[in-house]
Amino acid sequence: MTDLAGPSDNTANLMRQSVHVALFGALVYAVMASGFFLTGDNAPDNPNIYDEYYFALLDGHFDLPPRVVQFEGHYTADGTAYLYHGIAPLLTRYAFGWVWPFAVFPMTGFSIWLWAVIGTFAYQMAFFKIAEQHLGQMGETGPMLARLLGFAVWFASPGMIVVANGTFYHEPISVGYAATGVFVLCCVLVIQRKLNLSKAVLILATCAAISLHARPNIAIGLYAGAMFAITLLATAKIRRNAATIVAALSILGFGGTAYLGLNALKFGEATQSHSSFESGSVQYGFAYWGMERADGERAEAFEKYGRFNIGRLPHNIAIYTLDIPDIGPALSSLGEHFRSWAVNTLAADVGHIRVEHPHAGLIYLLPFWLALAVSSFWAQASVWKQFGPALAATLIAAGLTLTYATITLRYRVDLWPAIAVLALIGMSAIMPKLAAGNLGKGLQHGLAVLFLLGAITTTYISMGLLKLHANSGFGSLWTFEVCKTFAQTRDFTDADIVRICREPRGVL
């Protein structure tokens, strides 16, 4: 007699295949984050900065020694330095700092790895949950496709980019990536009625609050999405869910209050979130130490056109989407011509926009997911309605990123959540056809080719990203003499120099 596997057995097998891929992906990410591919001459710049931040807070200080912060900070006139970036990566230190051997290893690589794994696994589960029912109808093909879907998420999406670079720049990026991943997964589970909205609002609010201290541009969208969910819950049964609603609002309020309080501490104004290029106020580190002029092109663009300007959308969309990867001299040269055309044609009236290396448009990094996103146009109206709040939240985050005056590879990670939600909608349209055998072979082969293209390009770019900001001269811990040289340019007294150029508090 032959045993026939029931639906629960199929589901368990599909989940098992997905978890196996996730474990393999987490292992590969660990190798990337460990610096295994870097030689001793290519160590990431200043990987200890959040470790030092952690020690400073334990000592009751919110400021950091300029020898640690260097140019990436906000400076008061007396040389007091505050870190430019958000405090969310400190969560890793408070969770594991009591056992971490800081004297041997900085925590930056582990922190980036942890958040990248959380985010990537969350996105994998979001796509798996949309495909799960249909994969279960496809017999032996189902587990294979579950594995391929997992590989696509882990190796042909921004997770590789997040984990590829061990500098502190990627720590807040990784936290924001994890927050959006959990946010999107939570929305999928609510849509499928596998998670009660009364529980979901607490998770959504937590993701929004954490992201505010990692990537504020993302947080604005997540706050909007969380507030919509809270409003929906209140409209349904406000008395029954009053405690949950108050708790969710408290989480959002705590995150916002903490953000404003930190701004007030650094700038003297709760609503001010950036320092100035001008002297006489809290000043940006590059300008404070004379590396940038107050009348320079970047300062002028910020001052005249704002840090965020909707007029930058055409240029930034073109660069983020179509920029040609730096693969060989011919493509690099073509990319230079493309970027020159874009800035002269699309950004002539919005000031300077800094476009950082390495270069790669989303059509090369995420072609598989963009194809799924385009497939969303075939989704039913009911699916669009279900995903509407998640899509609106992630589009707000993407929109703010697209209006900023700087373009970098890591900022493409902030665009991924909106693409992912559109791809989820597209998958909702494609999977029934695939399960029923109504998806043409040509289209199936085309999606496979796009997956391979994305995986190859993402891996290539990520391997190059490993060495970005490594021994650049702008990140290694300043010696006392280097700090003294900079301090003397601002006419500080010897006593001030000793105070400003003090030893870091932690173990570096």
Image (cartoon, rainbow, N blue to C red):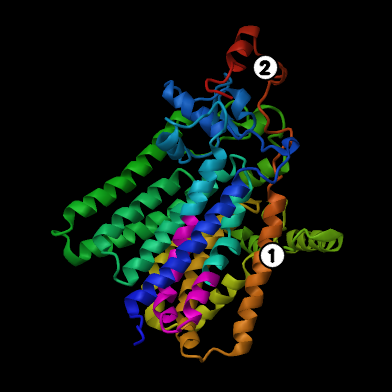
Residue 345 lies, with reference to residue 298, above or below; the image says below
What secondary structure is found at the residue carrying circle 1?
A: helix
Q: Quadrant of the C terminus?
A: top right
Q: Is residue 126 magenta?
A: yes
Which residue extends farthest left?
Answer: 239
* Residue 122 circle label: none
Q: Quadrant of the N terminus?
A: bottom left
Tell me the kind of residue under disc 1: Ile
* Residue wearing tag 1: 456
Task: Residue 51 in the image: state x and y as whole percent.
Answer: 52, 31
Q: Is residue 472 left or right of residue 24?
A: right
Tell me the kind of residue under disc 2: Phe
Q: Quadrant of residue 139?
A: bottom left
Callout 2 crowding tier (Cα within 10 Å): few <14, some 14–19, many ≥20: some
Q: Which span is picked out in magenta?
A: 119-148
Which residue extends farthest top?
Answer: 495
* Residue 480 circle label: 2
Could you tell me which residue is drawn at 66 percent across and 35 percent down?
A: 45
Predominant SS along the magenta part: helix
Pick the residue in front: 250 or 279: 250
Residue 241 lies, with reference to residue 259, above or below; the image says below
Task: Residue 227 in the image: state x and y as whole percent.
Answer: 32, 57
Q: Is residue 253 magenta?
A: no
What secondary structure is found at the residue carrying circle 2?
A: helix
Could you tell me which residue is drawn at 55 percent across and 29 percent down?
A: 282
Residue 492 lies, with reference to residue 309, above or below; the image says above
Pick the residue in front: 187 or 66: 187
* Mark closer to the observer (2, 1): 1
Task: Residue 474 in the image: state x and y as whole percent.
Answer: 70, 33
